[in-house]
Image (spheres, rainbow, N blue to C red):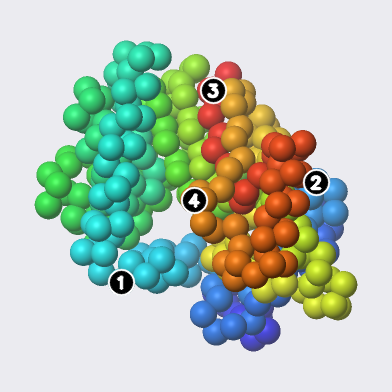
Amino acid sequence: MGKLESSDYIAVSCNLCGINNYKIYTLDDTPEAIHPRKVKCRKCGLVYVNPRATYKKYEEYYSNIYPHKGLTDIENIIEYMKPFKEHHRNYFKYLNSQMNPGKFLDVGCSIGSMVHASEEMGWEGYGIELSKEYHDYAINVIGLMNIYRGDIFSAQFQDNFFDHIYAWHVIEHVPDAKKFLMEIQRILKPEGGLVIGTPHINGFHIKTNYLLNRLRGVYPKQMTVDHHTYEFTSKTIKRMLNDCGFRIISIECYWPTSHVKNINRNWKGKLQDIVADIVAYLFPETKGYHMRIECVLN
């Protein structure tokens, strides 16, 4: 666990309730793991990395193309994003049926596909992206104007600037989730909308796999992936959003695709899937391992 003593890492308290009382939750000492250890707060239940990488380490890691998805060059990410083009347009079709177009921000905008769709549908689109290659592509190839390189703080937007903000699978990566949400609160107009996507660890598969590891006397290497700073449940993400001034409109737990339940597809896996579906029918917040949260600023 040499990483735990490195100058690239700092000890942190719970980001949700602020106390420093935790138990070890996962351990992953493989060389490629940016975060070797996650812990669970004994008071509020938030699962988070501790120690946490420094901002410099985060910037170094996320400035590269995301290797865990096999996206090793810009051509791959372009192909990866193509199937989402119609989905992005439909997103704004629905949004336009609820409100007049205004200013839209995509936090972690990749090559700018969502921002491009917003402008096609009458919005004034903005994006933030840490990767230099994605950022440059969005500006130089797609021709988008309002793409900022860095994080949400370095963009330095005005107070009450945006009508709608989209942060899809971003909050689990940021160093300080509460600070991130408070910045969104600052730049979002009153009653402005926020949509967040993030994994969750309520799911039956994740829970049972964790328990099986602990019964064997070991800690699992990870719940979702090692580079996530936070592993949320529906309870912890709701509390964090409420603490930061947001009102939850809806929360949906789901499988991202129909074929990712049990990779091995053996009889034990299929049985686990059946039980998971029954549990999810009775308790919807245990379904899958992703969640979509829609909320508004109070």
> In the image shown, does 183 or 204 lie closer to the viewer?
204
First-in-chain label (1 vs 3)? 1
> In the image shown, does 27 or 250 lie closer to the viewer?
250
Residue that mark 1 sits on? 72
Residue that mark 2 sits on? 44
Residue that mark 3 sits on? 297
Q: Residue 250 at what x, y percent from top left?
A: 59, 27
Residue 270, located in which quarter of the rendered image? bottom right
Q: Residues within 10 Å of mark 3 (few under 14, many from 20)?
A: many
Q: Is residue 227 left or right of residue 70?
A: right
Q: Residue 131 at what x, y percent from top left?
A: 32, 60
Q: Residues within 10 Å of mark 4 (few under 14, many from 20)?
A: few
Residue drawn 25% across the image and 69% down it? 73
Q: Residues within 10 Å of mark 1 (few under 14, many from 20)?
A: few
First-in-chain label (1 vs 2)? 2
* Three-letter code, disc 1: Thr
> In the image shown, does 235 or 202 lie closer to the viewer?
202
Q: Residue 254 at what x, y percent from top left?
A: 58, 43
Marks 1/2: CA–CA distance = 38 Å
